[in-house]
Image (spheres, rainbow, N blue to C red):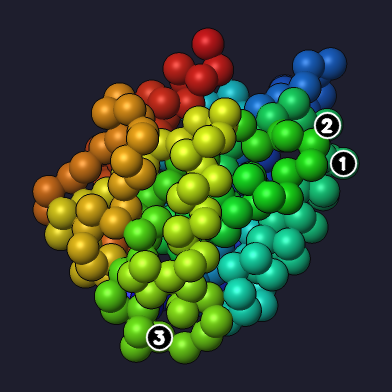
Amino acid sequence: MCGKFYLFFNKFKDQPNNMDCLLSNTKPTVILLVHGYGRDKTDWWWLRKQLTSLPCPIFTVNLSPTYAPIEQIAANSLTNKINLIKQETDCKNIILISHSMGGLVSSYYSEFLDADNLVQTIISIATPFHGTKISVTAPGANAKQMNPDAEFTKQLREKISHSQKKYYQIATQLDNIVFPWQSELLADTPATQQLVLPFESHLGLLHSKVVAQQIVNWIKQLLN
C-alpha cells in the first residue's frame, strides 16, 4: 500500500483556512482529512490546498498504531483528534474525507464510535470497501481486515447500508493497489454521489484536479 513519499523541511501543521468562521458565533462545519495504510497526513498537502476556498476549517490526522486493527486505529486516532477539534471549533458537524484504508477507519468511527453524531458525511477516495487482493502481501492486523471477503468489511458494509449518513465514493479503474477497482464503490450509493475515473493511479487521485473539483462541488451542495 506504499507509494511515493514527500519530504518537507517544515512541519505539516493544522492551520484552519477560514479563521472568520472560528471567530464568529456560528458553529462551523469542519473537514478532517484521513490518510491511508502506511502513510501519514503529508499525503494531503496538494489536495488540501485545493479545498481552501471552502468556508470550513480543515484538519489532518496521523493514524496510529500503524498496523493495529482498524477498530483500534479509529478509537485511538479519530476519537482523540475529533475531541480536540470539538474543543477548538465547537463545530456543528464534521465531514471526513479519506483515502484508501482511511475510508474504512472513517466509516467505522462514523457508524460505531460517533456518540455525538457529529459526522454526517464520509467522502472516500479509493477505499477498499470490499477488500483488495494485494492486502495479503501487507503486514499488520489492518491489512488482514482488507482481505477480500474479510468479516470486518462485510460487517461494516452491512452497517453502512442501514445508515442515515451520507457516503460519497471516488474510484479509479486504473487503481494499482485496490483489486478489483469496483471494491471502492458501495452498492447502495446514488450515482450522483460517486465519481469513477478511467486513468488515475491509487495515489494519483490525491493530485487530480477532477477529484478536487468534485469534492468541492459535493461539499458546497452539502453546505447549501
Residue at image position (73%, 44%) is 114
Check contact, mark 2 vs mark 1: CB within 8 A: yes
Q: Residue at x 55, y 46 (%)?
A: 159
Name the residue type under label 1: Gln
* Helix, strand or loop under label 1: helix
Relative to residue 207, is residue 81 drawn left or right?
Answer: right
Residue 76 at x, y percent in the picture: 75, 66
Residue 196 position by quadrant: top left
Assign a secondary structure to mark 2: loop
* In the image, farthest residue toward the top: 224
Give the mark toward the camera: 3 or 2. 3
Q: Which quarter of the picture shows residue 169?
A: top left
Q: Is residue 222 above or below residue 144?
A: above
Counting residues from the start of the chain, the first of labels 3 and 2 encountered is 2
205 w.r.t. 52: above or below: below
Q: Are marks 3 and 2 in contact (CB under 8 Å)?
A: no
Of residue 100 and residue 104, the one placed in the foreground of this image is 104
Q: Which residue is mark 3?
A: 138
Under mark 3, the amino acid is Ala
Q: Nearer the viewer, residue 103 or 60?
A: 103
Q: Is residue 106 above or below residue 212?
A: below
Residue 199 appears in the picture as rendered:
yes
Who's the residue at 27% across and 49% down the image?
Answer: 171
Which dot marks residue 87? 1
> How far, Cα to Cα, is label 3 from label 2?
39 Å
Pick the quarter of the image with the N terminus: bottom left
Q: Alpha-carbon distance for marks 2 and 1?
A: 6 Å
Q: Nearer the viewer, mark 1 or mark 3?
A: 3
The residue carrying mark 2 is 90
